[in-house]
Amino acid sequence: MSAPSLSLDEFVCFAIYTANGAFNRAYKPALNAIGLTYPQYLAMVALWAKDGVTVGALGEQLFLESNTLTPLLKRLEAAGLVTRQRDAEDERQVRVHLTDEGRALRLKAASVPESIVGALGSAAAPEDIGRLRDEIARLRDALNAR
């Protein structure tokens, strides 16, 4: 019986890992221009879609543990983009709210996705990107369900 292949070229996880690094490098100039890191940008995108969510709900949406999310939110709060407040009805919950400055940043951030599409150039058609996103999400969900 032969040993299984251990070629990096055959590992889906390696392709995803290295693509993640490439995407981070592609995002960096656009995000530097608006003063956010990639995880901070994701948190802001989630809050622009739905303001006032609990820290727990935001963590679930972003697939982040509280020990990662809390320092990220503290930095966004220090930058004046969000506030964190105890829920009036359930003091165990902390809600995250955009400030006026945080809402205004959305206009500056509107060009970020376009910069990534531009970086991809003709490497992928929009419909291919959509299918790839859905397949990767399916793999992620299958692994998280274990």
Image (cartoon, rainbow, N blue to C red):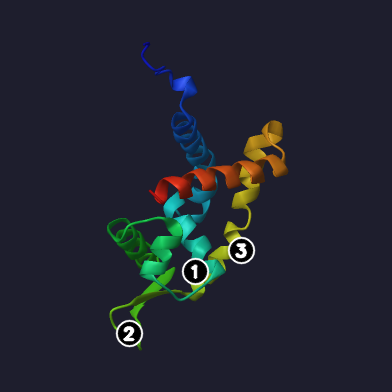
In the image, taking residue 121 as reference, residue 4 lies left or right, namely left
Whichever of labels 1 and 2 marks the residue nearer the N terminus, that label is: 2
The kind of residue tagged 1 is Gly
- Residue 37 shows in the view: no
Picture coordinates of residue 70 (x, y %)?
Answer: 31, 63
Per the image, the residue denoted by label 2 is 90
Q: Residue at x 51, y 34 (%)?
A: 19
In the image, taking residue 112 as reference, residue 59 lies left or right, namely left
Per the image, the residue denoted by label 1 is 102
Element at label 3:
helix
Element at label 1:
helix
Q: CA distance from mark 1 to mark 3?
A: 10 Å
Picture coordinates of residue 105 (x, y %)?
Answer: 54, 64
Element at label 2:
loop
Check residue 62 in the rendering and tell me which mark sits there, or answer none: none
Which of labels 2 and 3 is toward the front?
Answer: 2
User: Which residue is the extreme one toward the top?
Assistant: 2
